[in-house]
Image: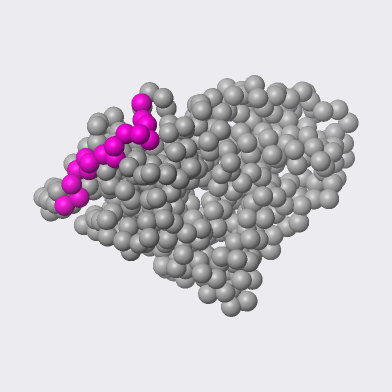
Amino acid sequence: MTEKTPILMWFRRDLRLSDHAALTAACASGRPVIPLFIHDPLVAELGAAPKWRLGLGVGALADRLAKMESRLILRRGADALTVLQELITQTGAGGVYWSRLYDPASVARDKDIKETLKEQGLEVRSFGGHLMFEPWTVETKTGGYYKVYTPFWNAVKELGVDTPRAAPKQIPAPEVWPDSDELDQWEMDAAMNRGADVVRPFVQLGELAAQDRLARFTADKIASYKDNRNLPGVDGTSNLSENLSLGEISPHQCWQAGERAMQEGKQGAETFLKELVWREFAYHLMHHTPHLLKSSWRKEWDAFPWKTDGESAEVMAWKQGRTGVPFVDAAMRELYVTGRMHNRARMIVASYLTKHLMTDWRIGMAWFEDTLIDWDPASNAMGWQWTAGSGPDASPFFRVFNPETQLDKFDPERAYTSRWIAEDRGKPHKDALAYFDAVPRSWSLSADADYPDPVVPLAEGRARALDAYENREF
């Protein structure tokens, strides 16, 4: 290897230049750096909204790199290893750097690539950055992993978080750039259909927008975050999940801003830090118990008599936001219009599906996997299993959220439901009407229709769920 031997900087879910350990190391080497994004099967398998949002993020990263007189090379292939080997041959690259991912499929892919390329004499380095604490570095006093959040929080809150790195001032370019695909050719927006135009105004795209979002949150909203984060009709959250999921901002940057706010005496700052650690806890569990993504974390819950028909009339009413339960329906419509859903609402819709409708949590998890622009494998699985009662440190199954009393408590003025439900209203909110522009035409939904009666009366659904729980066979 010489000072002119390029490094392939493989971007994945780390679409930023600042606080990027892999990119910083590549640039510090003094060798040419070739930024790369690969459309491999793990990208191809993404749901409609996550894939579309990833495509937007890749485009924003390409623009950032171009302004630094660099480029983002785009390549598509049947497997990432073959793409890398082809580029190594074409460019004479001597190394590949990347930021670690932690879901089982990515871990298996990356392990195979690292072993193969090292055997071929290549330098292969992986770096942290998607998490503040590598999952294998946090252990209980007996050497095991944490299964309950509060002890996990107590263990990591005093560990200290690495200071975020500045973006490189220059990215050394190769003498000759390899060919690149055109992003539009990948059609990453195809499955969104007409919904893309509806959701797009709600996207805060790219690293600079993410940093601005964080700055505005810590300046204006973090002080009241502890209370306002539970009010779906109030803009009281950071909304950073969209950017964190794709690494447009790092958790270290968020932590530093939260710590600074706490030092300034802003009351909601510690709660914000705890939410960042909840994300870490989800990854901690996914690393140690990867079956979290596909099967009940508590194995006995595999025997629970959940319904498994994802196309039943009840489940379709849930997906369409037509259950006749305003809190549930408002949340599902917010999802279709914005690509996100308020966290309190996520708990309500998950509880309703798994308890009132007695439907398997995996059906809901898969729907979110297809419709969320802030989809995250660990957080999505953890959230659904927590609400369903089958997961670690879970809400007990017999805790059945009542959507009516929850609405009275957290949306007493009905700001949330008024924004998202159009039927039977003289002058519906524009966002409520936008829902009908976003959904598939095959659903044949109209704002002029009457609002539906409940598909299952709440008292009946609750009683059915509790009866199933009391008579379970485990």
User: Which residue is found at the position 76% from the left and 52% from the top?
Assistant: 167
The vertical placement of 122 against 230, above or below, is above
| Residue 383 image point, x, y percent | 39, 51
| Residue 62 image point, x, y percent | 73, 36
The vertical placement of 121 against 348, above or below, is above
Q: Nearer the viewer, residue 107 or 275?
A: 275
| Residue 473 image point, x, y percent | 13, 47
Q: How many marks?
A: 0
Residue situated furthest front in the rendering:
426
Task: For residue 243, say whether it is visible.
Answer: yes
Name the chief secondary structure element in magenta. Answer: loop
Task: For residue 31, say whether it is visible.
Answer: no
The vertical placement of 311 against 31, above or below, is above
Q: Nearer the viewer, residue 437 or 179?
A: 437
Q: Nearer the viewer, residue 65 or 228?
A: 228
User: Which residue is found at the position 73% from the left and 25% from the top?
Assistant: 180
Q: Nearer the viewer, residue 431 or 42?
A: 431
Magenta segment range? 444-459
Q: Quadrant of residue 91?
A: top right
Tell me if residue 457 is in the magenta stretch.
yes
The quarter in which the N terminus is drawn is top right
Q: Does residue 406 appear to the left or right of 458 in the view shown?
A: right
